[in-house]
Image (cartoon, helix red, strand yellow):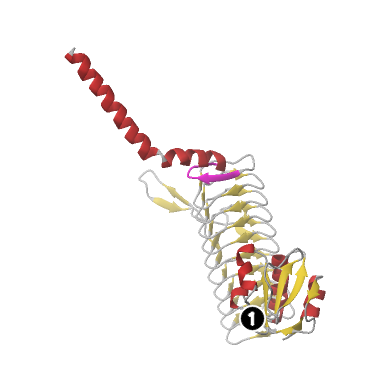
Amino acid sequence: MEFSAKQIAGLLEGMVEGNENVCVNQLAKIEEGQPGALSFLSNPKYEPFIYQTLSSICIVNKDFIPAHPLPATLTLVRVEDAYGSFAKLLEVYTQFQKKPSKTEEPCFIDPTATIGKNCYIGAFVYIGAHAVVGDNCALFPGVTLGDHSQIGSDTVLYAGVHLYHNTQVGERCIIHSGTVIGSDGFGFAPDSQGVFSKVPQIGNVVILNDVEIGANCTIDRATMGSTKIGNGVKIDNLCQIAHNVEIGDHTAIASQAGVAGSAKLGKHIMVGGQTGINGHLSVADHTKIVAQSGIPSSIKKADTFMGSPAIPLNDFKRSYIGFRRLPELMEELRALRKEINDLKEQKKAQ
């Protein structure tokens, strides 16, 4: 499907600079542009590419001032926020890529399940007893919806996603391949001989609206009650969310992070990759945690934290300066010790 510069500017409330009738039919990074492609420029680091790109249209910020002549074949669409506007176009593009509503064979849908309108259900999908699928959903091949599980309207489950029984997922959610939601929490009780007995996990997982979960994540069901994921939460690939965890609205968690059981994360938190968060603690709203940090205890006041155990970022930087100087300080210490020993020997000789 083709779009003209004029149509794109209308959609983004932007202004065309160049040929408003030029059309594009594909998207491309500015450094890989080609005729008929639409690109964008927001990061100044990529500005050199705009002077040689082959793309037909480029979205730029309104205040962009070219330092060199632009290609004669390039049309600009000036907007308030180039990155945000390009993201909006990607959403439109994704809508055109949606699967048509149909049910492929073979698949199994329990007679007691409820399936909404305009859904795509791929081959080998299993939908259990009393499960509910909202309108306009897409369940790609190999998806499993356990008994009494629910997904809201416009939600997409990619191939190989498994929702255990009683799992609830809201509207407009996206869950990527290989993710398992509602598996048993890590609950075991040792007896007097140290032998572990399994604690039954009878709770569930509740995911609210506009959540996106990456590939190969695991979100465990609660021992009792619910593991809760708030509105607008974004979870990257390969993350582990343990039983009874609560994650507040619009929190983002990067790849390979793990959150231990019963931890409560507030709203608008940013968690860097490979971070480990201990169980039974709370993290204040708007906290930022740098990658590879360890959070052993509650964070009661928002700040940026780094290290393991994590401390406020400015404290960590000061501490790291001392750590980097440690070899030098040890050398000075050895020199001082030698001087002291020499002085002792001189005193003995006197």
* Residue with the mark numbered 1: 54
Which image quarter holds the C terminus?
A: top left
When asked about the image quadrant of residue 346, the answer is top left
Q: Can the viewer see residue 235? A: yes
Q: What x and y, as percent, mark residue 8?
A: 77, 77
Instruction: Report the residue at 28% width, 25% height from top.
Output: 339
Q: Nearer the viewer, residue 45 or 239?
A: 45
Task: State the extent of the magenta-drawn residues as a range.
Answer: 304-312
In magenta segment, residue 203? no
Q: What x and y, as percent, mark residue 289?
A: 57, 49
Q: What x and y, as percent, mark residue 53?
A: 63, 77
User: Given the image, on which type of amino acid does mark 1 rest?
Assistant: Leu
Q: Is residue 24 left or right of residue 331?
A: right
Instruction: Report the residue at 70% width, 64% height from top.
Output: 210
Q: Nearer the viewer, residue 243 or 80?
A: 80
In magenta segment, residue 307? yes
- Categorize mark 1 by other alpha carbons within 10 Å: few (<14), some (14-19), many (20+): many
